[in-house]
Image: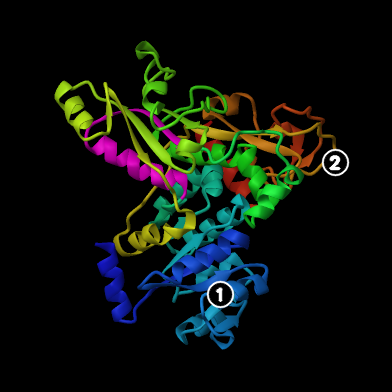
Amino acid sequence: MIHKELARRQAEDNPIRVGASAIEWMGSGLVAAFAHVPGMEISVLANADVEEGVEAFLATGLKRDQIVLADTPGEIEDAVRAGKRVITRDPRLLAQIDAVDIVTDSTWSPAIGADVAEACIENGKDVVLVNIEADVTVGHMLKKKAKDAGVLYSVSSGDEPGCLMELFDFVKSIGYEVITVGKGKNNALDTSATPEMMAESAAKSDKDPVQVASYVDGTKTMFEMTCAANATGCRPMQRGMTGPEASFENVSEIFALEEDGGISQFPGNIDFVQGPSMSGGVFVTVRVDDQRIQDDLNYLKVGSGKYFTFFRHYHLWFLEAPISIAKAHMHKQVWLEPLDEPVADVMTVAKRDLQPGDILERFGGYTNYGVMDLAEEARKLNALPVGISPGAKIIKPVRAGEIVTWDNVALDEDSTVVKLRRQQDAMFQ
């Protein structure tokens, strides 16, 4: 059991030393989470905002003299071996520290995630991404590079894709036919959501209004379910999925196949539901034709009829990420990785009319949002992956609601994420 292995490492004063690239609210949360895990520690934290990193460590009870700022591999190495916690500004340095056992990235940025993962692969360091946005954008290329280099590449547990992968594996392992893989959206979908619109609700929960807007406008949900689609092979039934109102009491009926009165056009689809009953959870709806198994599941209060939904009512983000990171280091266990070919992608859509000279903002901003579709459809449309949209410069007008294409923008061709995405696209053309 993993907790026994970690307890043993704790008793032996031999913790798994993690290098973490983490910023803002997610970063401080990751540091706080690791502070409670036996046998593991964040030894090096990469954060461009040094004081933000210091505050995250201090909040766990560390003293100021236990925290060192260092920006060269040698300085970092010496400090870690001396038992210090280190903050560095450059996330790519995490891969170069021998005293660091494994690296993770928990930023929202595909650009940072791609930088961190590529550096790890080039330096022979295993990497586990909490950053699903990076996986959706360039995960297939990272997986190939990692395999060629003999390095572990994985997405973590905790966010919806990792939790869904666990549930998907469970129902497949006991032989049930998967009809729908899905999540409960925390808030009603509104693709027009902006930081200004979300300011009040964000303040109530002490969150960044841009971050909250990315939840409400659907971009985060599209990333999550695309990550899950690319790992399971499940496909959306339509662009953006269907997103019906549902509760646990009727979700099995809703996602029954059309021939049985539901909305599922085929087995193995991926979707999300709205409404408070399943908010924050993940689910897999299955079909069971064996009457005996139906009776047993009915007796066990899983459901009735031949459609049953297995529901995990929570996901814990970065709070449970240490489990998958520990398993990756100690057992070389991949928690989630994309299949060999993309199933789905997240396309960039204009949130307002865009004119030449406009710069596309980070997810949840005023300029654009993401929508999921089949990867082959995105290729046909020449759609710009939303994962490389932050910072892109509009060179041709795009009307509100239209898909932004590669031809509509000028990109930083020197950035790692753009290079990897172009390599990835070439691999599948």
Image coordinates for residue 14, horizontal then vertical, percent: 34, 78
Tally of numbered tags: 2
Q: Secondary structure at mark 2?
A: loop
The answer for how far apart the CA atoms under marks 2 and 1 are is: 42 Å
The answer to whether residue 148 is magenta is no
Estimate the x, y position of residue 395 in percent, counting from the top left.
81, 36
User: Is 412 left, or right, of 98 in this rendering?
Assistant: right
Residue 206, visible in the rendered structure: yes
Type of the residue with mark 2: Gly
Q: Which residue is most to the left? A: 292
Which segment is the magenta one?
159-183
Residue 357 tag number:
2
Pick out the residue farthest to the top.
259
Q: Is residue 95 visible?
A: no
| Disc nearer the start of the sequence (2/1) | 1
**In the image, what residue occupies the spot 20% across and 25% down?**
294
Marks 2, 1: nearer the viewer: 1
Q: Residues within 10 Å of mark 1 (few under 14, many from 20)?
A: some
Q: To which quarter of the image does residue 302 belong?
A: top left
Q: Position of residue 415 (x, y in %)?
A: 66, 52
Residue 334 in the image, given as x and y percentages of width and height: 36, 52
156 in relation to 400, above or below: below
Q: Which residue is mark 1?
A: 59
Determine the residue positioned at 39% across, 56% down: 152
217 on left or right of 229:
right
Tell me if 271 is positioned left or right of 65 in this view. left
Residue depicted at 47% across the width and 30% down the height: 271
Q: In this orientation, which residue lies closer to the viewer: 272 or 238?
A: 272
- Towards the viewer: 427 or 112: 112
